[in-house]
Image (cartoon, rainbow, N blue to C red):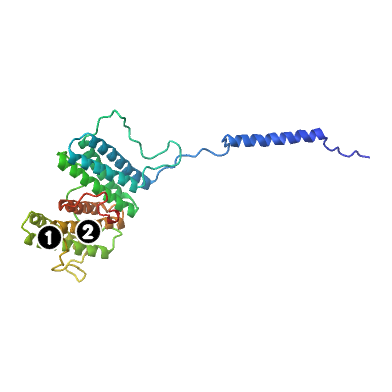
Amino acid sequence: MDAEPLSPTVPTRRRRLVRAVLGAAAVVALAACGVRIDTPPPSEPSPDTHEILRSTVVADALDVERLATSAAEGTDDADVSAALLQAAAFAQAHAQQLGGTYESGLADAAVTPEATTSPDDEAARVTDVVEALAGASVRARGAADTTNDGPLARLLASISTSDILAAEQLGDLTGAELPETVVPTTAVVPETLPSGVSAADLTTLVEAEDAAGYVYEVQAARTADAGRERSADRAPIHRDRADDWARLLEIDSTAQDPRSTAYVMPEAESVAARGQLLENNLAASYASLVGTSGPSGRTELVDLLADSSRSAVSWGAPLTAFPGLPEQE
């Protein structure tokens, strides 16, 4: 008769149980120590074009804020100090509106480089701030023309305008010269229609530019003070822009041409206030067009935004952090 297989003895079963418990304990210990044999450590994500454009403008804003704050501490001129602190505050607002410095969530990882300064560094000069503002304006203008994000392009166009106007203000106060590579002071209507912009929006712009020219002509005829010369200078500029846009749309002297022989004069307390109103409204229109147009065709629109904003300032309007963006006021 065959012998029955023997059942494991009690000691044998105990040894197997001990080995199983020890093996499980080892797995738990490895997990507690953070050891992952089959999972590689997380890597730094590569920023896309959108993030590179955004973070570059943020870095510029942080640099302007640092330099302007430092320069303000080193000047005894109250007007210059106020302008520098205003530039620093605007730069801080720009960085915040753009979302601040990029953080990936990984240790020691960030796209935006930190400024390398020490408490012993000499105070920045006004010329340093002017150069930083001018350079930041150029880069924001280029980014506005490049990005596929319309709302971001509109914001960048406004930031570019804010930077160049702040640089010009400091230049006027101190005599500091702006670098040669800056946003053009002579703005022109583009030679081709911006992509993505509706004919209705551009037709409205034709009427707005023509109306501005008319109002300035009336002001020049009625005014005897310093506003007369400025009105006379701006009138043909806006009339010419209306002509250029109408020809570009191919509605010049057609039934679709919205221009009129006369317009209602906007209500305003003074000639200067009316000039500010006209130019700020046009600046907002050009900023909106930047947001709706496609990339690689926005630079002229950014320049026209800057020109109208600059003219509003010449009429006494205060500098703002976001010219052309009334919702930010």
Percent position of residue 27, x then y: 64, 36
Residue type at numbered disc 2: Asn
**Residue bearing the label numbered 2:** 281
**Residue bearing the label numbered 1:** 216
* Near-viewer residue (79 or 153): 79
272 in relation to 106, above or below: below
Q: Is residue 252 left or right of residue 69?
A: left
Percent position of residue 203, x then y: 23, 65
Which label's residue is closer to the chain start, 1 or 2?
A: 1
Label number found at residue 119: none
Q: Quadrant of residue 59?
A: top left
Residue at the far left in the pictured view: 224
Quadrant for the N terminus in the image: top right
Residue type at numbered disc 1: Tyr
Which residue is pictured at 5% across the width and 58% down the height? Answer: 224
Say which element carries label 2.
helix
- CA neighbours of label 2 inside 10 A, class few (<14), some (14 to 19), many (20+): many
Percent position of residue 85, x then y: 24, 41
- CA neighbours of label 1 inside 10 A, class few (<14), some (14 to 19), many (20+): many
Say which element carries label 1.
helix
Q: Is residue 254 left or right of residue 61?
A: left
Percent position of residue 143, x then y: 30, 47
Residue 187 in view in this figure: no
Q: CA distance from mark 1 to mark 2?
A: 14 Å
37 in relation to 97, above or below: above
Q: Quadrant of residue 13?
A: top right
